[in-house]
Image (cartoon, rainbow, N blue to C red):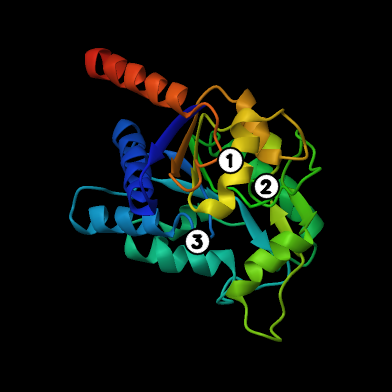
Amino acid sequence: MEIIIHADATQVATRAADFITAQLGHKPDSVLGLATGSTPVATYADLVRRHQAGSLSFAQVTTFNLDEYVGLPPDHPQSYRSFMNKNLFDQVDIDLSRTHVPDGNAENPVEVGPAYEATIDAAGGIDLQVLGIGTNGHIAFNEPTSSLGSRTRIKTLTEQTFKDNSRSFEAGEFQPRLAITMGIQTILEARRILLLATGASKAQAVVDMVEGAITASCPASALQMHEKTTVIIDEAAASKLTLRPYYTWVLDQQDQIRDTFGNPW
């Protein structure tokens, strides 16, 4: 993993937007895997600003979101489809027919996963997958004990994830306990991965992911097996890392290589 530590969440968002912008500059018709949740909101806002300034286009981009709640229609304000439309899709020049979110309101949600996998394959696979990380180490909705070889499927949310996500729902409002999520193996097949984490509440999950053992108890630790994963975090999320000087040293050396030979895209 490439570990990049910034002072605060704003700098994390800017660096992540730089990364995505570089991807689209390299390949304007990239297939992007996108995440929801509070962490990527600032990154999406930065991308929207760049688009509105005329420096970034999504016209040729195809997207696949990681997950969706089971039981919420696409137009529900708490659905991840609504989240993506509000925070990114409706503000840029993307073709909505090329944006994909699992159908959490399907008549038979069991059939959604295999169909979603087939659609990803038909698009040529994911070029860059954006991830967040849960306080319990989950990526997408792959909760602890999820198979490291899992594919898109229905997943039961843990009580901790249910509690963490309750801030988005009103008291007494239906809050799903099931989600359709890309599997860990699906995520690992992306050509590049970008994981973002901010805040002290993510510090334990980050150290378990980066410096811990590869284990289903911390699903994000599976990213240690991926060839091109970049982790961008703020000081708070990095607070429990024990090898910080090494990560800084490595980044300095890699920057020198990039400055001399260009980005090894």
Q: Are marks 3 and 1 in contact (CB under 8 Å)?
A: no
Residue 44 percent coordinates (x, y) = 38, 56
Which quadrant: the C terminus? top left
**Dot placed on the residue nearer the N-terminal end, 3 or 2:** 3
**Dot placed on the residue nearer the N-terminal end, 2 or 1:** 2
Q: CA distance from mark 3 to mark 1?
A: 16 Å
Which element is circle 3 on? loop
User: At label 1, which amino acid type do we have?
Assistant: Val
Q: CA distance from mark 2 to mark 1?
A: 11 Å
Within-10-Å neighbours for mark 1: few <14, some 14–19, many 20+: many
User: At label 3, which amino acid type do we have?
Assistant: Ser
On screen, residue 156 versus residue 181, left or right, reads: right
Residue at 38% over, 58% down: 42
Q: Is residue 22 visible?
A: yes
Residue 260 percent coordinates (x, y) = 23, 13
Residue at 25% over, 54% down: 51
Q: Which mark is residue 219?
A: none
Q: Is residue 60 visible?
A: no
- Taking depth in this image into account, of 91 and 232 the one nearest to the observer is 232
Residue at 67% over, 72% down: 72
Residue at 52% over, 26% down: 243
Q: Which residue is identified by label 3? A: 38
Q: Which mark is residue 138?
A: 2
Within-10-Å neighbours for mark 2: few <14, some 14–19, many 20+: many
Residue 152 percent coordinates (x, y) = 72, 46
Q: Nearer the viewer, mark 2 or mark 1?
A: 1
- Taking depth in this image into account, of 195 and 57 the one nearest to the observer is 195
**Dot placed on the residue nearer the N-terminal end, 3 or 1:** 3
Which element is circle 2 on? loop
On screen, residue 154 versus residue 87, left or right, reads: right
Q: Which mark is residue 206?
A: 1
